[in-house]
């Protein structure tokens, strides 16, 4: 436990060669301010990228730290404790803070900020934690995950019916972030048998769930096998009927088992569509060009169409079905279990 009155908290921030502050330093300070913990930082010492003799660079060399920011708990001239994670420092600070010290910023931050949720997930579950990449929300998650500096994996479900624009977009994201993306395809034998029996467009007559089970749910089950956790871009307001109670962190009972537990991380659960698009614009995150053509929610080409300005984003998915619970089975336990 950190007793603030008896110790000094020093933050070492990095100043880039162009005079700007490193992005991770800005994010760390912002997080501490939101949590009501910034006033527990006693001093800031700058590490100037262009000056190896600047006080912060000297401290970084002394303690063998290569990442910014980092924190020293205790007298920097003595033998302080070194924190390289603002989140871990935050926990230490709050452990000795009065209950009211943390600031409540309302629904959007009630379950902590997405960056914090993702960083905690990657620190807790390790590099085998995977992001399921499909829509705009998922690219925001990839962007946030890349800011943590921690390793993670990404997979995408190629159903065989995706728009050409979506396929090109997957490559754009891969190159933009310099990451590997595991492409999961349907089992060829199972798909061939399904199409031979029901045809290529059976979903228009019998509903989309059997087709989604073959093309999406079964490949997802393979993608998640052996993983400790996965991260999604789900939001509560995407579909209040099925996602209204979505939690930022929850046990996945659809794809996990007692023998092989699986955690599901939904860092954008409390965000709205406006929050997502504000983030994408502010951080120059690449987006699928179909969004500009009126597709807010993009799935397989035969099952997705643009929506009007007064329509909910999910109304463009499986529009021929009279069903308010439009899900493909990736995020509903019953549908997932039906295909197991």
Image: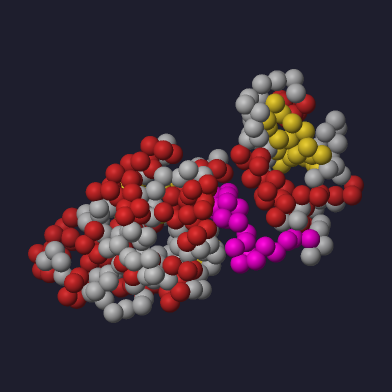
Q: Which residue occupies the extreme left position in the image? A: 196
Q: Quadrant of residue 105?
A: bottom right
Can you give x and y, in whole percent of width and height, for residue 192 in the image?
13, 59
Question: Can residue 125 be seen by looking at this rendering?
Answer: no
Q: How is the image coloured?
A: secondary structure
Can you give x and y, in whole percent of width and height, for residue 225 in the image?
38, 56
**Residue appearing at x 25%, y 53% in the figure:** 163
Front position in the image: 34 or 337: 34
Q: For the image shown, how many numbered marks are present on the structure?
A: 0
Q: Which residue occupies the extreme bottom position in the image? A: 322
Can you give x and y, in whole percent of width and height, for residue 312 in the image?
39, 69
Can you give x and y, in whole percent of width and height, for residue 260 in the image?
45, 61
Describe residue 219's horizontal placement relative to residue 16 as left or right.
left
Q: Is residue 33 above or below residue 335?
A: above
Describe residue 169's horizontal placement relative to residue 244 as left or right.
left
Q: Is residue 67 above or below residue 109?
A: above
**Residue appearing at x 68%, y 38% in the figure:** 69
Question: Can residue 245 be seen by looking at this rendering?
Answer: yes
**Residue appearing at x 51%, y 53% in the figure:** 278
| Residue 127 part of the magenta segment | yes
Q: Quadrant of residue 296?
A: bottom left
Which span is picked out in magenta?
101-130
| Residue 189 part of the magenta segment | no
Q: Quadrant of the C terminus?
A: bottom left
Front position in the image: 194 or 325: 325
Q: Is residue 17 above or below residue 13?
A: above
Q: Which residue occupies the extreme front position in the image? A: 309
């Amino acid at each position: 436990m950190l007793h603030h009155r008896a110790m000094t908290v020093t933050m070492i921030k990095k100043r880039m060669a162009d005079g700007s502050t490193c992005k991770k330093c800005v994010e760390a300070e912002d997080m501490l301010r939101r949590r009501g913990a910034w006033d527990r930082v006693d001093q800031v010492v700058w590490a100037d990228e262009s000056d190896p003799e600047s006080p912060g660079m000297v401290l970084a060399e002394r303690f063998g730290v290569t990442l910014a920011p980092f924190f020293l708990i205790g007298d920097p001239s003595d033998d302080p404790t070194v924190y390289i994670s603002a989140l871990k420092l935050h926990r230490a600070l709050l452990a000795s803070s009065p209950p009211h010290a943390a600031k409540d910023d309302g629904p959007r931050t009630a379950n902590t900020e997405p960056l914090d949720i993702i960083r905690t997930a990657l620190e807790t579950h390790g590099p085998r934690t995977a992001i399921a990449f499909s829509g705009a929300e998922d690219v925001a998650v990839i962007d946030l995950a890349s800011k943590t500096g921690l390793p993670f994996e990404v997979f995408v479900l190629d159903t065989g019916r995706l728009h050409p624009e979506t396929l090109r977009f997957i490559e754009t994201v891969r190159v933009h972030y310099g990451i590997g993306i595991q492409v999961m395809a349907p089992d060829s034998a199972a798909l061939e048998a399904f199409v031979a029996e029901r045809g290529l467009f059976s979903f228009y007559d019998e509903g989309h769930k059997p087709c989604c089970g073959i093309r999406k749910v079964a490949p997802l089950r393979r993608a998640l096998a052996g993983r400790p956790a996965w991260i999604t871009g789900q939001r509560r307001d995407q579909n209040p009927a099925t996602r209204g109670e979505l939690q930022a962190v929850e046990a996945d009972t659809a794809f996990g088992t007692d023998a092989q537990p699986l955690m599901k991380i939904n860092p954008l659960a409390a965000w709205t569509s406006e929050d997502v698009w504000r983030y994408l614009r502010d951080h120059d995150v690449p987006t699928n060009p179909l969004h500009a053509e009126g597709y807010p929610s993009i799935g397989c080409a035969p099952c997705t169409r643009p929506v009007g300005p007064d329509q909910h984003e999910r109304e463009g998915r499986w529009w021929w079905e009279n069903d308010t619970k439009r899900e493909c089975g990736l995020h509903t336990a019953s549908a997932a279990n039906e295909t197991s």
